[in-house]
Amino acid sequence: MAFSFLRLLRMPCYSAVAEHSEHFSTNSSGARALISAENAKKLMALAIEEAQRSVNEDEGVHPLVGAIIASGDGEVLTTAHRGEDGTGRHAEFIALSKATEESIDLTNAELFVTLEPCTARGPGKTPCAQRIIESGIRRVHIGMLDPNPYILGHGDSALNWERIKVEHFPSELVHELRELNAEFIALHEKAHLPATSLYVSTQICDIVLQELQREGVGIHELPYEWDVSITDLIQFCRSYSSLKPAELTETLYMVRGRAYDKKYATYDYSNDARGCRPEWKDDFRSVLSRLELDDFDDRHIINVGIGNGLEGLGLFDKASDLTLIDIGRLSLDAAKKLLPNATAFTASAERLEPIHDSSQDVYVSLRTYQSSYLDVIASVREAHRVLRAGGLFVASVANAFVVEDGAIVSGLVIPHTTTVDRDRPFAVAEKIRRHLTIMKFADVGVFSGYTEIYVFGRRIV
């Protein structure tokens, strides 16, 4: 390799994404081979069976991991499970070693592995992600992400950076893997936010409930699961309100805006991962560089969910045509003071009514799409509407919290708990990515940065 693996882990990682359920590769004769979605799932199940055979090398808790290498037409080339040779070696290492011993050409092979490949090993050991990169394999199917915060997301990103296609097991198989590795997961998923954290003490669902009651809506509890959207909330509240549907809709959008104002209008980065890792701005710039947006400041830019404007300092100060959008009036007033040359509108990501069709060159929305009661699908549709052909979409999902000991951990807080869910940011990013492909965006990619996961694409129609 031209540069060290450590450097690779610190560089941005991108992936173009397939738009269909079939998985394609090219066989050694040059013909295009196909692994159907059905066959791919069978290979995933086979990898899980291998994982169940894993052998621990000592009394410690280790993950159960299985690996299958298959040819482009779905033929199983090698199988492996962790520790099968009695040494505790990783499943990927064993599977690749078998292929080398049997002189199998892996140029167009696909790897199915139940745990995200590692990017860090002990002294003198090569991480599995690097071995995969050097093997010639061009597509990797990953089961569960590694709960170890030193690995989480980095294996996925390292492969993507090298243009290796990464697919993920479907949710029902991931659930099976999480049950299989429950003890291993428990070792790493004990990160909790302090009870005094803003993300624990002040939750949007509670403020929205209070505001609805203040508006006379006789409701005593709201759904607060992470994927409940404003559209779901409107339907849920209809049974508790005498308001007409249109009036209830406007009321809910209004109180959601008030809730975010109460939580974030005066927010700063004093106890925020961005404050601890100012390199997050370099991550954003690297996405722009990847999209060849050298003239960013000269474009028509819309920032959706600007909050109080703090994130715009150093990123949008020099923009010649900047439009700011936020659902909180107080937050937007603060943003306008920090970015006085911008045009500002109080609006939601789902309803960018003040913005004309095909009027924007760049759509930016940072750490907004994971927000409580945001409708991701409606928001992506609106982004498509306001972007011109060739316009660029860049959104990020928060993926870092400062915990009690001052350390930064990856994840998002589970509503009404102090627990950080390490998988949720990736689930939100995948939802965005998937809908970008549905809307026929090109150059769609995902990049795991220091504090957030970026999803980007280019509107082509």
Image (cartoon, rainbow, N blue to C red):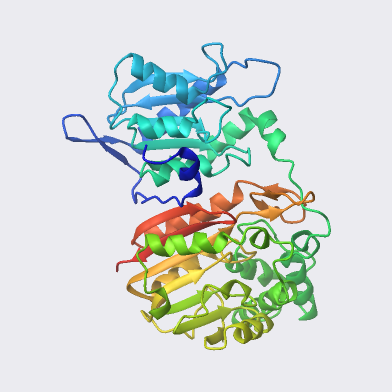
Which quadrant, please, contains the N terminus?
top left
- The answer to whether residue 169 is seen in the rendering is no
Residue 43, x across and y down, in percent:
41, 28
- State the residue at coordinates (73%, 64%): 222
Residue 114, x across and y down, in percent:
51, 31
Tag count: 0
- State the residue at coordinates (60%, 50%): 424
- State the residue at coordinates (58%, 68%): 231
Examine the rendered structure and indicate whether residue 14 appears above or below residue 147: below
Quadrant hosting residue 166: top left
Residue 321, x across and y down, in percent:
44, 84
- The answer to whether residue 389 is seen in the rendering is yes
User: Which one is nearer the viewer's eye here, 361 or 312?
Assistant: 312
Which quadrant, please, contains the C terminus?
bottom left
Using residue 319 as the reference point, say whether residue 107 is left or right of it: left
User: Which one is nearer the viewer's eye here, 434 or 90?
Assistant: 90
